[in-house]
Image (cartoon, rainbow, N blue to C red):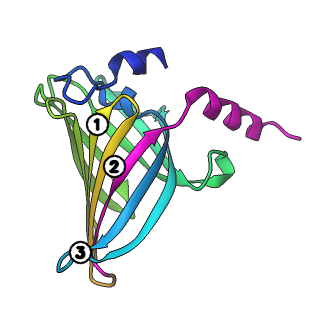
Amino acid sequence: KKSREMASGSGGSGGAVDPCDYLCGAWKRNLEWRQFGGSFKRLRGTNAIVVIDEYISSVREDGTRYLKWSFGRGLKPTDLRFGYVMKFNTDEKKSQADTTQIEWQYCGHTCSGVFQRNTEVYVLNFHLKTSTVVITYRILDKNKMAVCIVEVDGRHTPTVQIGNMYRLDDDKYSRMASSAKQPP
């Protein structure tokens, strides 16, 4: 927790953010869904829990870290569903000094993204067989990000989803997660 507080962005800190340390933890995501185009008609609002944990991979590479993303309605492990594991290439020799390259698999497709240090923005691209999703996370402060998701596919109304993600209390999250693992 201490390293995250020291490494967390303050919205424009100009490169002090470690992209993996910042993301780790439990988050509450609130989104407003609107039709993408025309009058941008409001469709609905959603709330979700997003838990991002360091993932220890059997593949060891210098400058590479892995984060596991899970999504759900509560903090207990039984309330969460696995999303994906993202690979962050933090090796300055392999990537440009101001960016961290990100890649992962989703529904059998390789996806890619980038963290831009100077603007403290993550851009995640999901290019799937029948849809495209682009997610932008902008760090506002050490406990809050702005979120914008554009989702287009051939079967559903194209949407733009806007909102925020708020970091949940680490101590409370740790207590809930450990109590859920212990048998009654």
Label drawn at residue 139 = 1
Q: Point out the tag, 3 or 1, that comes first from the N-terminus.
A: 3
- Can you say whether 65 is above or below 82 in the image? above
Check disc 2: other Cα within 10 Å, few if <14, some if 14-19, many if 20+: many
Instruction: Tell me the distance, in whole angstroms, between the alpha carbons under discs 3 and 2.
Output: 31 Å
Residue 165 counted in the magenta span: yes
| For residue 133, side relative to residue 107 (left or right) | left
Tell me which residue sits at (22%, 40%) in the image.
121
Which quarter shows the C terminus?
Answer: top right
Task: Say what amino acid the circle numbered 2 marks.
Answer: Trp
User: For residue 158, which quarter of the picture?
Assistant: bottom left
Task: Say what amino acid the circle numbered 3 marks.
Answer: Phe
User: For residue 32, which quarter of the picture?
Assistant: bottom left
Tell me which residue sits at (46%, 15%) in the image.
2
Q: Which residue is mark 3?
A: 40
| For residue 160, side relative to residue 45 (left or right) | left
Q: Give the x, y percent position of residue 144.
A: 37, 37
Q: Which residue is mark 2?
A: 104
Q: Give the x, y percent position of residue 24.
A: 44, 33
Part of the protein shown in magenta: 157-184
Tell me which residue sits at (10%, 30%) in the image.
96
Q: Point out the tag, 2 or 1, that comes first from the N-terminus.
A: 2
Q: Give the x, y percent position of residue 152.
A: 25, 73
